[in-house]
């Protein structure tokens, strides 16, 4: 599976992930990577755990969550999983 970008300081807002991205391929002729920008993914379609990391599948790619934002990032993720936990894992 190809990882589109790594996300740190992740927080879930509705059904999207907001955070700081790293190693995201830019849409240019030399395929440069970008680091340290803010990303808001498209709708999360699936979430699953690989080792100690969570992976997210969206319509635009696959993201690896490296860390959650302090003070509610992990809680927002768990709240997203709870309504229909079987769908995510």
Image (tube, grey):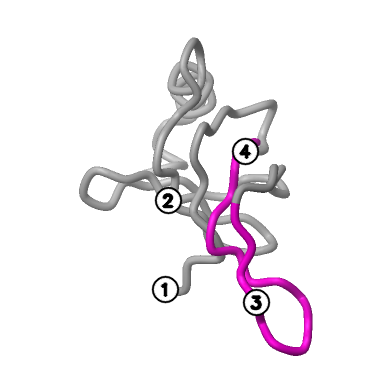
* Neighbour tally class for label 4: few under 14, some 14-19, many 20 plus, Cα within 10 Å: many
- Mark 4 falls on what kind of element? strand
Quadrant location of the C terminus in the rendered image: top left
Q: Name the residue under label 3.
A: 32
CA distance for labels 4 and 2 = 11 Å
- Mark 2 falls on what kind of element? strand
Residue at (51, 13) in percent of width and height: 72
Label 2 or label 3, whichever comes before in sequence order: 3
Callout in the foreground (4, 3): 3
Which portion, as a residue range, is magenta? 18-35
- Taking depth in this image into account, of 66 and 48 the one nearest to the observer is 66
Q: Is residue 50 left or right of residue 20?
A: left
- Residue 46's x, y, as percent? 51, 49
Please tell me whether residue 11 is drawn above or below residue 35 in the rendered image. Answer: above
CA distance for labels 4 and 3 = 23 Å
Q: Mark 1 points at which residue?
A: 1
Please tell me whether residue 29 is drawn above or below residue 71 in the rendered image. Answer: below
- Mark 3 falls on what kind of element? loop
Q: Name the residue under label 4.
A: 17
- Residue 45's x, y, as percent? 59, 50
- Residue 5's x, y, as percent? 54, 60
Q: Name the residue under label 2.
A: 55
């Amino acid at each position: 599976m190809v990882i589109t970008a790594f996300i740190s300081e992740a927080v879930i807002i509705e059904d999207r992930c907001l955070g700081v991205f790293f190693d995201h391929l830019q849409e240019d002729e030399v395929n440069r990577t970008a680091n340290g920008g803010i990303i808001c993914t498209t709708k999360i379609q699936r979430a699953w755990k690989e080792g100690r990391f969570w992976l997210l599948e969206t319509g635009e790619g696959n993201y690896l969550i490296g860390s959650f934002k302090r003070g509610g990032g992990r809680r927002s993720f768990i709240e997203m999983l709870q309504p229909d936990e079987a769908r995510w894992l």
